[in-house]
Image (spheres, rainbow, N blue to C red):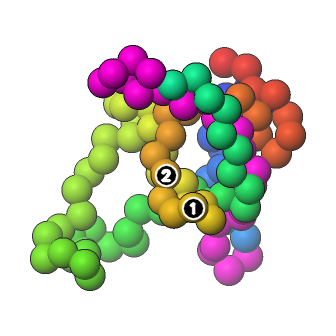
Amino acid sequence: MFLSEVIKEMRKLDDKKNPIPFDITIRTYNQQNKSGGRLVSYENATLMQAPKNTGKIRLSQNIDFKNPNHWENHTRNLKTNAGIKKINIFFIIKYNGCDVVL
């Protein structure tokens, strides 16, 4: 499966406009201290969606939502059972059991 197809599949919504859960395996990497390489699997993960209305205020903090520049940084936020995780799309190894190629 190509990475472009994976990104499209991750964005899909069901009839009620909720994200469709998927299983994903990624390779870890920390750019600051050049460490990582473990494989991490997340089951029933969903792609985090941007707020519907711009300028929404966070409930936990009194600041506006920031633009994470996912397109430039090649990152995505996933909602998993372990919390919210930021991943680099180039480190996706498997998506729903299928190998991913660039």
Does the rendering let one see residue 90? no
Horizontal placement of 78 versus 5: left or right? left
Viewer-closest of 72 and 32: 32
Q: How many marks?
A: 2
In magenta stretch: residue 92: no
Q: Which residue is mark 1?
A: 82
On the image, the x and y values in percent for residue 44 come to 73, 61
Give the quadrant of the C terminus: top right
25 lies above or below 30: below
Mark 2 surroundings: few (<14), some (14-19) or many (≥20) residues within 10 A:
some
Element type where label 1 sits in the image:
loop
On the image, the x and y values in percent for residue 80 come to 60, 61
Q: Residue at x 73, y 20 (%)?
A: 101
Q: Residue at x 44, y 31 (%)?
A: 74
Give the quadrant of the N terminus: top right
In magenta stretch: residue 16: yes
Q: Residue at x 67, y 32 (%)?
A: 39
Q: Residue at x 54, y 54 (%)?
A: 78
Viewer-closest of 15 and 59: 59
Mark 1 surroundings: few (<14), some (14-19) or many (≥20) residues within 10 A:
few
Magenta stretch bounds? 15-35
Q: Which residue is mark 2?
A: 85
On the image, the x and y values in percent for residue 18 come to 63, 73
Q: Toward which corner of the image does residue 57 lie, by quadrant?
A: bottom left
Viewer-closest of 59 and 34: 34
